[in-house]
Amino acid sequence: APTLQDPLVKQIKNGFKITHPDANTISLVCPGGGSHGDSNSGESGCELINIVVPAGTAEKPLKIKVLSGNGGMTLQLSNAYLGSLDANSAGADSSINSDLPATQGGTISLVSNEGDDVTANLPASFAADRIELVADADKVVLGSFTDITKFDGTTGRGTAGTGLASLKLVSKSFAGSSGQVNLQSVQ
């Protein structure tokens, strides 16, 4: 017998798309569903998607752009060779939790648009030419990286040119406050 979820599942299946628009791009779109019975559109869509990408190389570094319209994300990229990572999360639970490399010349930007936590787990010895950490003043957590004293992008950490070109972590203020911006060390 059909259930109220059948139209929702059909809608999401029909809207789910993986495309390869050019030789360097793979695009995945998972739409939100509409309202059907007691299932509302704000709580429907793809609950959990795991995407596995190749690690990249010095000759072909990864350029990753991740957008979440409703929900948080976990990025496990510590073994990747990142040219760039641009992750933006919005909606309910727009938190971002990431394991990241400090690829020489790479750029990383992680943004929670609705005041949830942004966490970056980086190697203890990571270097970055520019570091920008944006959250309420009492919500920037440095862990063992206490040598980072400016958060406005005017300074970095370590020897210039040996690590990331830039690291930007942002928890935008929502309903009067931001979430935490956390830098954590991995061994």
Image: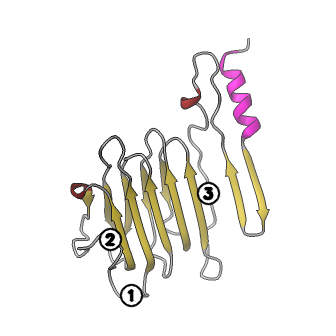
Numbered range of the magenta stretch: 3-15
Q: Is residue 28 left or right of residue 152?
A: right
Q: Secondary structure at mark 3?
A: loop
Frontmost residue, 43 versus 103: 43
Q: Give the Cα separation between the discs numbered 1 and 3.
A: 31 Å
- Which residue: 51% across, 54% down? 88
Q: To which residue does mark 1 refer?
A: 160
Frontmost residue, 61 versus 40: 40
- Which residue: 30% across, 69% down? 151
Lower position in the chain sequence, tag 1 or tag 3: 3
Q: Is 171 inside the magenta-drawn segment?
A: no
**Magenta stretch secondary structure, dominant:** helix
Image spot of residue 21 (x, y percent): 78, 61
- Which residue: 39% across, 78% down? 128
Circles 2, 1 touching at the beta carbon (< 8 Å): no
Q: Which mark is residue 70?
A: none
Amino acid bearing label 3: Val
Image spot of residue 187 (x, y percent): 34, 70
Q: Give the Cα separation between the discs numbered 3 and 2.
A: 33 Å
Amino acid bearing label 1: Ala
Q: Secondary structure at mark 1?
A: loop
Image spot of residue 26 (x, y percent): 71, 60
Q: Is 13 inside the magenta-drawn segment?
A: yes
Callout 2: few (<14), some (14-19), or many (20+) C-alpha neighbours within 10 Å?
Answer: few
Q: To which residue does mark 3 refer?
A: 52
Q: Which mark is residue 152?
A: 2
Amino acid bearing label 2: Asp
Callout 1: few (<14), some (14-19), or many (20+) C-alpha neighbours within 10 Å?
Answer: some
Q: Give the Cα separation between the discs numbered 2 and 1.
A: 17 Å
